[in-house]
Amino acid sequence: MQLRKENILIVDDDIDILELLQRHLQSWNYHSYKAVSVKEAVTILRDTKIDLLITDLKMPEIDGFELIKFVSEHYPKLPKLVVTGYPSVQDSLSAIKSGAVDYLTKPFTKNELKEAIDTSMSITEEKRDKTIVLSEEKNKAYGEIIGNSEKINDVIQIIERIKDNKATVLIKGESGTGKELVARAIHYQGKFARAPFITVNCGAIPENLLEAELFGYLKGAFTGADTNRNGFFQAANGGTIFLDEIGNASLAVQARLLRVLQEKEVVKVGAQKPEKIDVRIIAATNSDLREMIGNQTFRDDLFYRLTVIEIDIAALKERKDDIPLLVDKFLFKYGVEYKDRFIKITPEALDVLKRYNWPGNIRELENIIQRAVIMCDKLIGVEHLPEHIKYTLEFSDDTLQPLKVIEKKYIEKVLRAAGNNKTKAAKILQIDRKTLRQKLSN
């Protein structure tokens, strides 16, 4: 008999109960997942479509009540069945109030479990489909890409169009905007997801080694080449190779890459015979490649080969609507990792994050949330944020500027009026010459 499509997640710190529940579920042809902690359960929920949650209440660290609340918030239509060995009227009411569909007390018979599961699973197929939609709508995640801003939706639309072909893609964007996440989405959301995905940071490999690392080499090709070795392109055969920071590749490597794109073949260092290869190339850069072409540090023919499809990733300051969703993701990630609990953030602190312009983009936001989670107990407030973020204001009026900037401009104006005579300007400003020099140099 085939397993039914329903996936049931069972959560209990008692291994014997987990094994018992799993045996019962298998006998009814359900597919089951086991977790001994809430932390493990949430990880499974993030990666797997679950149709029913069965959880104990009394568990160390994060308890079942917190799990039910989390599931109710993030997967609002997922049915939840509580199984507990510590029954009480208060716990029963709290569990139902938190979103549990049914409540089963240990010890229970197999028939009682089946009836409780049937009650919890009585949700119709139509409602189950809505559950998936609502869950996706709530999380606004596409692969690892988080966001529902117009700019992110535009990127996702492009990915949907290209994910099932092997057109070459160039991803452009500032450092920390998530270019690799976009590359991964192109690969893993499409029909080639089971094929290899190989990431190469062209800026992290020394220039004299990059060619050998990309294309492989034969024994004796250079000092230290003791054996034949395949490169990243051979490892990615049939799948995708992601060339991050492509602007850092030397002109010699660029010429070899052009051959790969034109001829669909690679030549190992020290070899004469080419090898046919079937690889989708996705490149990324935070450099202006057109400017580099003008400076003759990037090949124009390679540029046009790479830009069959171009994807521009907006800086975080241009997609501030996504900040609450990104914050939620990082709160979950680091709250569970560092605190074994779900950390929340005050509206005031979130407002501060939304005002800031994020020169370091998503990477900077993640680092700040990580630090705030460590510094807080259960709730991140303004006091847990760095000083330079707290007092940053976003002005729509360009005439409003920091006092330091206005002061320097006024000093320069006085200095011009004084015929560039610093002694006279200092006297007008009622400061000494040393202070004047310091303010002009800042």
Image (cartoon, helix red, strand yellow):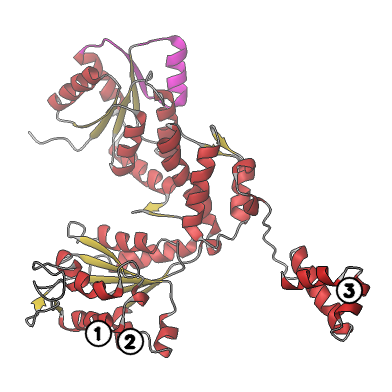
The kind of residue tagged 1 is: Ala
Residue 60 makes an appearance in the image: yes
Disc 3 and disc 2: Cα gap in Å? 54 Å
Does the magenta portion include 98?
yes
**Residue placed at 44% from the left, 41% from the top?**
334
Nearer the observer, 248 or 97: 248
Disc 1 and disc 3: Cα gap in Å? 60 Å
Quarter holding residue 377: top right
Q: Secondary structure at mark 2?
A: loop
Q: x, y percentage for residue 205?
A: 30, 68
**Residue placed at 11% from the left, 67% from the top?**
229
**Residue tagged 1:** 255
Q: Residue 426: give its label.
A: 3
Q: Are marks 1 and 2 in contact (CB under 8 Å)?
A: yes
Q: Secondary structure at mark 3?
A: helix
Q: Quadrant of the C terminus?
A: bottom right
Disc 1 and disc 2: Cα gap in Å? 8 Å
* For marks 3 and 2 on the same chain, the one whose residue lies earlier in the sequence: 2
Relative to 375, 313 lies left or right: left
Q: Nearer the viewer, mark 1 or mark 3?
A: 3
Quarter holding residue 83: top left
Range of magenta residues? 86-109
Relative to 397, 213 lies left or right: left
